[in-house]
Image (spheres, coloured by chain):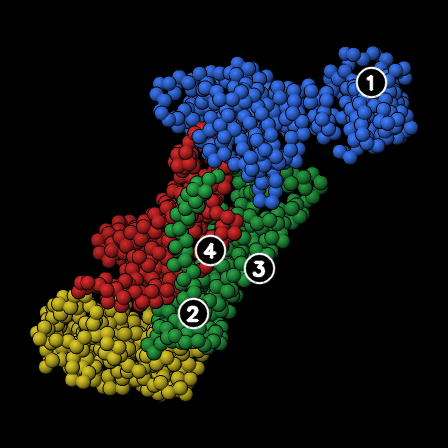
Chain colours: A red, B blue, C green, D yellow
Amino acid sequence: MRALVTFVYVFLYTPIALVVLFSFNAGRNASEFIGFSAQWYGKALSNTFLMEALRNSLIVAFTSAALAAIFGTMAAIGMERLGARTRAVFDGLFAAAIVVPGVVIGIATLVALVEVFGFINPVLAAIWPGDQPPRLSLGYGSIIAAHGLFTMALVTMIVKARIAGLGRDIVEASSDLYAAPLTTFRQIVLPQIMPSILAGFLLAFTFSFDDFIIAFFVAGSNTTLPIYVFASIRRGVTPEINAIATMVLAVSLALILIARFLMREKKKPTT
Amino acid sequence: MASASTNDIEFRSVTKNYGPVTAVKDINLNVPKGAFLALLGPSGCGKTTCLRMIGGFEQPSEGAVLIDGREMNGVPAYRRPVNMVFQHYALFPHFNVEQNVAYGLKQMRPRIAAGDIDRRVAEALEMVRLDGFAKRRIYEMSGGQQQRVALARALVNRPSVLLLDEPLAALDKKLRSAMQIELQTLQRDLGITFVLVTHDQEEALSMADIVCVMSAGRIRQLGAPQEVYDHPADLFVADFVGKTNRIEAKLEAGGATLRLADGSAIPASKPVATDEAIVAIRPEAIRLSRERVANGASFQGVVTHRIFLGSSAEYAVNVPGLGDFLVTADRSTMNESDLVAPGDAVFLGFDPAAAHVFPASTA
Amino acid sequence: MTLTAQVKKRLVTIALVAPASLWLFVFLVLPFIAIIVFAFGERGPVGGYQPAFTFEQFANLGARAAAFVNTLVLAPIGAAACLLVAYPVAYYLAIKASPQRRLLLVSLVVVPFWTSLLVRTYAWMYILGARGIPHLLEYIGFDNVRLLNTPGAVLLGIVYGYLPLMIMPIYVSLEKLDRRLLEASADLGAHPISTFFGVTLPLSLPGVMTGIALVTILLLGEYLIPQLLGGGKVFFIGNALVDLFLQSRNWPFGSAIAVTLVAVVVVVLLVAMRIAWRIAGTRQVDLV
Amino acid sequence: MPTNYTISTYHKLGLIDELDLSKVPNFSQKTENPRFTKEGRIDGKTYAVPKNWGTTGFATNTSKLKAKLTSWKDFFEIVQTEADGRGMVHDYQLTTIGSALVSLGYGFNSIKPEELAKAEELLIKVKPHLFAINSDYQPAMRATDAWLTMCWTNDGAQLNRDMPEISYTLGKDGGEIWTDYYAIPKDAPNKAAGYALLNYLMDPNNAVKEHLANGAPTTDSRVIALLPKEITSNKIVYPDEASLTPLEFGAAVTLTDPGRAELMARFKSA
């Protein structure tokens, strides 16, 4: 069994290792390793299209993850205070947001936004006092919205689990010790759920940063990093893609490791 | 604090409903200042609900709870001059011991000077003998130590009432008895009203000076521990507080004589107005001997089991026609010849005056 | 409680859930209604949508039968293949691995799942491409072997991509398993193999079910793996959808397919939950 | 940047403006090859000016394939035999269906249902033998995963430049010829900048740089004059007039025909 397990780990990491290895290839061919060189990183970093895509991805990932962390946490707390029936509706919707395939989320968001924009834009044009009425179109906003849907559900799930594990008693203890609800939230609840919120934020960031399929539909004229990588893979293979891929891997790897560290089990203060 | 009332806590016709379920039904209760009240009952009897209504974690559906003469309906927990020791202590895991204890003081308005807080925290920790543990993390402490932190955290605020929700349930037996004594001493020294919730009758009887036995949301008996034990108000109390042998009986001679199932008769300790009755007798009120005792009630039976308890022993004795009896015998008061073993034929005797007679309909 | 306090509490609750509700409504419920409406419409003259009420799109689903068949065959096979590889790993992690090393080993399994599937799939593109494994095979005399753009390559990509998602729930259910049960079974004279089939496997079934459900559901909407490792020849529903929306711009037909896909997902989910409930209570999956 | 057959559609939908040629002084109608400019003009008005032109043929890796292909008929045959599992067709209905039609002896632009049905039959028969359906065929050709692919002029020139064993062939039975144009969208936010860019690109000195980077042939004789000999003599980029004769321009109706779109989708999902 050890041999099998070892094989699986090799299976999991060899492709990743190869991508990284070839990113340091001195040759221009992605398949023959000639010697070590960081030149492709230099090329990648001075590629303005790539940097633009990276910037877009970072903006989208940060914004959607931040919104997801804030609104998702609020929802997780708020749901505790809802009646059983309303809560079940929320649970169902959040579950749907997680289970519905990304490709459908992308399509549905595209269809809905195009319709909504088609309705709003003429109205805006009609009531706008200036010459250049603003036109709503696909772009940052739509990617953030679509990513935010999944990641908000993710954060809510994680934070809710933490709140459930928290127990009502320390909240009551704080209230018993003269802390008003807001103080209790700030001093007791928030520090306790903070690691989960941060972990949720990081996972949301990673998801958004890595997502291809949803952005593919709703990105409009904005290119995100995965869309750029996808296009590069199709167009041609130079180690520059490997350099980009390695950087993408490094970012998500770092984030997921931090998230795991934050979510590790802590010893419970019981006997 | 200037006192407006001689009662620290007062329940006025308090009812608490959770939807269709009534947890507490029409409770009236006065707890005088400085008393140590134990709310005793099986789980689901409403004792914890009562405690939580004092603490402000629940609001009564009907009636009112008063603390120090002031009606508390609608007053949230954080504005009540009471503190609670929670069942699983509910210590804040992200704070150390000192921060846990100081928490309540830091919330007080007007603010207490930092130096005063430090001094009071140190005093409180000293009081529960945890000086030197101030900087410890909670998860580094044993269960007993955590219990003391919880106690210090509540007492440091000098509440007028301390609420204890099964505070000793999580401790092992030895530690529990030590803490019982400690809590009693603390209560006497501080003069604070204590309200203890427990399902452990021994704990209630040993610590409290008023025991309130509850069942199904109602108070069954309220009184001093000895009174509750010796004069249970009904069969439930008799059963729940201490061990009891039950004998079914029919009343004769206008309620003066009890005719038992085996045909024998004993005089009733007090007249009962029904035909059918249950006679309740404590195991330690029964005397076990190899010979028939001349006066009082006496039955012959066979020892079926013996449970050795160190200073005492419990015997199960089967009496034909009446069933099994539980008898506790203190070894120091027993004759050598009375040490019996399973299979021995023995006589059970008791003073009819020590037997409580209840109408069978209350069983 | 006083009326104002109750009203206040209610307002705070509403404020807390309002942003998420708005989000769920505008970006989940509304779009969903939109694609349902679209599914009953007609293709516009140059693509897009034209209002109508027709069942034509649903009647035409047969035109994508191959994509449905591919997906509905390869997704469960992929999940089953994942399971075969995942179970021994999960078993090793939960039962055999030393506690000190377990955390690290589990992390190593989870981490790839959260890194870009695109990049990981790309890695296989060139391992399976002519200059990868086929090139190595030439040295031992197998010329012109083609691995890329075959159903086998897609299956491999699926196993690779979704293995962590299968290992985790099984690991969680095995790890919760009371070690004393295994000892009890051994104590009662059971051979390790009968212990496995009599005790371990049945108790880990909820994890297995969760894993199969998760992997199958995600595969139903897969696009990248068949696209990159199947060369546009191994066509999944996801690929059909991308095609219909971004290329031939037949939005109503695409919507009908999307609605059908969601229906399939729901059915798979319900069946999985049914089975999971029957085996044992539900369990939470630790995805992180 | 519309291709010839899309301009009339864009015009009909009101997506593009009529060009004000006075703002593009570098554009010279006289030096343009008229064969490649007429699609830019509708009802005597200019809506688009040409960028470059090209052909759709096929690229063959001659070190892997022994057969000599000269027609689309050969292409579809070899793809099923010697190049089994190594041939690629575009993920683009115009060229893929068009070439299949040509191989069957029909017109590139046919939308006749019975002819399309034959083409579909052929494509679906061929599909299991294909390596991929993908318009980005360069990586697969370079990696030698694919040996034979439908190919556009500029890609063919690039592939041949880097790997001389890859040849580029125009079908003698027909195929496509195309011109890419520049146009200005009606709702462009900054039309002045659009004209400035257009004028810059129309300057032969700039157009020649674009040509060298992209590889597709120019429509402007002024640019040809500036090109190095090895490009103008490259038969891939500037083929003989004779080999161009059988080729057809794609028609607008070919691209928008829902029947062809659906055929392509059926082929891909088959």
Q: The disc numbered 2 marks a residue on which chain?
A: C
Of the numbered discs 3 and 2, the one sitting upstream in the chain is 2
Viewer-closest of D99 and C28: C28
Q: The disc numbered 4 marks a residue on which chain?
A: A
- Quadrant of the rendered image containing residue C239: bottom left
Residue identified by numbered label 3? C271
Residue identified by numbered label 4? A93
Q: The disc numbered 3 marks a residue on which chain?
A: C
Mark 1 and mark 3, same subunit? no
Tag 3: residue type?
Val
Tag 1: residue type?
Asp
Placement of the N terminus of chain B among the 4 image quadrants: top left
Mark 4 and mark 2, same subunit? no
Residue identified by numbered label 1? B351
Q: The disc numbered 1 marks a residue on which chain?
A: B
Residue density around tag 3, few if under 14, some if 14–19, many if 20 or more, within 10 Å: few
Residue at 31% from the left image edge and 67% from the top image edge? A119
Mark 1 and mark 4, same subunit? no
Q: Report how far apart the C-alphas of labels 1 and 4 lie in the structure.
A: 71 Å
For numbered disc 2, what is the local secondary structure? Answer: helix
Residue A138 in the figure: left or right of residue B87? left
Using the rendered image of the protein, determine whether residue C31 is visible from the camera's viewpoint.
yes
Residue B34 in the figure: left or right of residue D261? right
Viewer-closest of C54 and A31: C54
For numbered disc 4, what is the local secondary structure? Answer: helix
Tag 4: residue type?
Leu
